Image: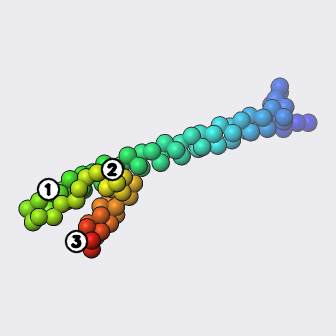
Amino acid sequence: MSFLPAGLEFNVIIAYAFGIILIYLIGRVFLMPIKLVFKLIYNGLVGGVMLWAVNFVGSYIGFTIGINPITALVAGFLGLPGVILLILFKIFIN
C-alpha cells in the first residue's frame, strides 16, 4: 500500500522538489546583483544631491567642493557618508 496518489512515483516528487529549490536558488543569484546596482544608483543620487546642496549653501560662506570624477565617485559609492568625508577632507586640507 502506497501513500502516494495513483500515477505519482516518489522519484517524480523528488525531481519536482529539486527543480523548485534550484529555481529559487538561481533567482536569488540573479537578484543579488540587481539589488547592488539599485543601491549604487540610490547612493549616487543621494551623494549628488548632497554635493549640490553643500555647494549651494556653501557658496554663501565661501565653501565649495569641486565636482569632478573623484568627488563624484566618492559621493556616489558612499552616499551621505562620502559627502561628509569630502567636507571633512576639504576642511582639514585648507
Q: As drawn, is 76 to the left or to the right of 22? A: left
Query: Which numbered disc, 2 or 1, marks the residue closer to the eye?
Result: 2
Seen as rendered, the residue at the extreme bottom is 92
* Label whose residue precedes the other's in the sequence (3 or 1): 1
Q: Which mark is residue 94?
A: 3
Which element type, helix, strand or loop, lies under badge 2? helix
Mark 3–mark 2 Cα distance, whole angstroms, equals: 20 Å
Q: Which mark is residue 56?
A: 1
Q: Which mark is residue 69?
A: 2
Q: How many marks?
A: 3
What's the amino acid at mark 2? Pro
Mark 2–mark 1 Cα distance, whole angstroms, equals: 19 Å
Q: Residue at x 27, y 71 (%)?
A: 93
What's the amino acid at mark 3? Asn
Circle 2/circle 1 CB separation < 8 Å? no
Residue 27: quarter of image: top right
Q: Residue at x 14, y 62 (%)?
A: 58
Which element type, helix, strand or loop, lies under badge 3? loop
Which element type, helix, strand or loop, lies under badge 1? helix
